[in-house]
Image (cartoon, grey):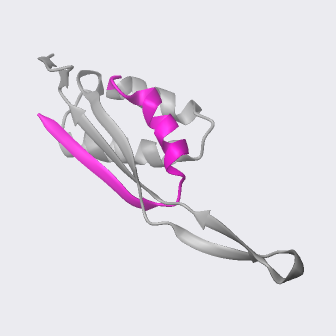
Amino acid sequence: MDFIAKAKYARYSPRKAGQVLGLIRGKSVAKAFGLLPLVPRSAGILVFKTLKSAYANSGASDPERMFVKKAWVDLGPVMKRVRPMAMGGRGIYKRKMCHVTIVVSDERNGKKG
């Protein structure tokens, strides 16, 4: 059975969060919990909390039997900001947000156990 957790409107770049999700996709929850604190990206904290929530939603007692079935990131709203530039111009830069979704299952690649 699948259990889902979502983190919406997170102030991380979708590309950087996606790189962290790529590390845990397909692994057991126990391995992912061991790996995420060692990841040198700040988005690792967000992914760790979302994975912890998905595992808690499952109600399972053993993280070795649960697997990260799917993990993806979507682009959230973009805040546009302006910085003064030379000769009265303006430089627009974007503050990106993302939505992280993690699906945890007790099946590995469609096979139980």
**Residue 51 at x, y = what percent?**
35, 41
Q: At 32% across and 23% down in the image, what residue appears?
A: 28
Determine whether 70 is above or below 111 in the image.
Answer: below
Q: Is residue 16 magenta?
A: yes
**Residue 78 at x, y = what percent?**
50, 66
Q: State how many labels appear.
A: 0
Q: Which residues are magenta?
A: 1-28
> On the rendered structure, is 6 left or right of 60?
right
Dividing the image into 4 quarters, which one contains the C terminus?
A: top left
Q: At 35% across and 22% down in the image, what residue appears?
A: 27
Residue with the most extreme bottom position? 88
> On the rendered structure, is 73 left or right of 70?
right
**Residue 21 at x, y = what percent?**
43, 36
Residue 110's quadrant in the figure?
A: top left
Determine whether 1 is above or below 53 in the image.
Answer: above
Determine whether 45 is above or below 28 in the image.
Answer: below
Residue with the most extreme right position? 87
Residue 109's quadrant in the figure?
A: top left
Closest to the observer: 9 or 113? 9
Dividing the image into 4 quarters, which one contains the N terminus?
A: top left
Q: At 49% across and 44% down in the image, what residue appears?
A: 17
Closest to the observer: 69 or 50? 69
Residue 86's quadrant in the figure?
A: bottom right
Q: At 23% across and 45% down in the image, what residue appears?
A: 4
Q: Is residue 9 magenta?
A: yes
**Residue 44 at x, y = what percent?**
52, 42
> On the rendered structure, is 87 left or right of 89?
right
> On the rendered structure, is 109 left or right of 96?
left
Closest to the observer: 71 or 31? 71
